[in-house]
Image (cartoon, rainbow, N blue to C red):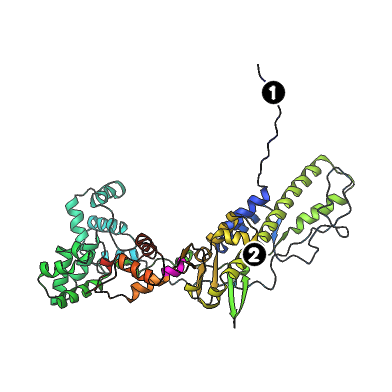
Amino acid sequence: MLKQNLSQKLQQRLSPQQIQLMKLLQVPTASLEQRVKEELEVNPALDEGEPEPAPDEFEATESSSDDIDLSEYLTDDDFEIASYKLSSNNYHNSDEDKSIPIPVIDSFHDHLHKQVGLLNLDDREKKIAQQIIGSIDDDGRLRRDLEAVVDDLAFTQNVHTELSEVERILSKVQTFEPAGVAARNLEECLLLQIRKKEETPSILHAKDIVSKYFDEFAKKHYKRLMKSVGVSEDELRSAIEEILKLNPKPGSGYTSSVKVENYVIPDFILINNNGDLRLTLNSKNAPDLKISNEYIEMMRAYNKDKKKDKKQKEAIIFIKQKIDSAKWFIDAIKQRQQTMLNTMNAILDYQYAYFLTGDETRLKPMILKDIAEETGLDISTISRVAHSKYIQTEFGTFQLKSFFSESIQTESGEEVSTREVKKILEGLIDDENKKKPLSDQKLTNVLQEKGYNIARRTVAKYREQLNIPVARLRKEL
């Protein structure tokens, strides 16, 4: 037998407005314009343009005579929908329409295809050459197996060939410019370039090293190389210099398009006016949005109409829903601006010495919790702001999350930022004797002598985070 009972349960749920705000906070400035365009497309009640001056809040006292309350949508005087002005004069005007000129040039693959015509090939061989070129990546390397190229030719070109024929045509394509193109690995790429150079003693030694002792060269086993190749230290140095002049990515000098997506648009602009730091939002964060005038007129007409039928009621319910959605979106944009400013101002106060000088050693240890406590915002909110936002300063443009770091304690008990330790570590490696680079243990000893309590494994972790190789791979002749 089923039993029924009542129980109370307290749950915390985010409102649609809060969810919308959280989503907008994650959107960087570079993508905000597209997000606004998407909202304009799906909501006809939302419109672009600077709204006319109007009260910030609705103060309507008149209601519809029917069962649909419009008082919160209409003002007492002219039944105007309240306007929302999102931008003001204090936002940095960096949103000028600046287009990047794109040069009209041949792409890398166009350059290769043109060279096919210079070879004495029949139509069948030209198809094979063009298939090979189509398999070359933007770096200039052929990373597709020749067996797969044979299959591609059969299925896409109806050209049935053998591996030996494809290899023969490949050897012709490998004579194209730039030197090293269509190589299947790094060694072949370097060898193709070496073979096009004048055969000096250094070039001959370089050819020997790449073709026979590439592994030893890559691991910088210089003594073993001198013995294997039969050269002196000076001769080995000259040969290595010739190898280092070669281009491991021969296609990198060509581009088919300008990669605009790599261009960073800062969310904040920080100006240092003789020690007075002034923070502003990028004006792209403050789009001019308003409620559509057409929907205002619809609301007015419905309010004045004495006879309201069922279809009119259904229409006005739809209009109310769209206006509510537009208001929520505009409010979310406003809250996004305020949240971003509050967060960045807290970071600015916390790291004031750094932003004043640009000296990374003056960065204080700072975690998300510190800024959350400073602003009264949730840690997850601070994380959303810090993760995808950038600030432009006089010494560079940086992602906000780069200012957050854990702390490490010195012998005196003082807590310093791990960024400070990394900066010192980077300096030690820059100044080391490259013939005898410092091992992780020696770097640890030096840091400990400077008063930083740090373990060798931590030094190794910081070195890897800085993309610095181990001592053996930093060694030079």
Q: Amino acid at mark 1?
A: Gln
Looking at the image, the residue that sits furthest to the top is 1
**Residues rendered magenta in the picture:** 417-422
Visible residue check, residue 174? no
Q: In the displayed structure, would residue 252 be above or below residue 24?
A: below
Q: Which residue is mark 2?
A: 342
Looking at the image, the residue that sits furthest to the left is 230
Quadrant for residue 254, please give it. bottom left
Quadrant for residue 276, please give it. bottom right
Mark linked to residue 4: 1
Indicate yes or no whether the magenta region holds residue 215.
no
Which image quarter holds the C terminus?
Answer: bottom left
Apparent side of residue 404 relative to residue 274 in the rendered image (left or right): left
Residue 204 image offset from top left, x and y in percent: 13, 72
**350 or 77, nearer to the observer:** 350
Q: Amino acid at mark 2?
A: Asn
Residue 434 image offset from top left, x and y in percent: 27, 74
Q: Tell me if label 2 and label 1 are in contact, CB under 8 Å.
A: no
Apparent side of residue 267 relative to residue 62 in the rendered image (left or right): left
**300 or 33, nearer to the observer:** 33
3D distance between C-alphas at marks 2 and 1: 50 Å
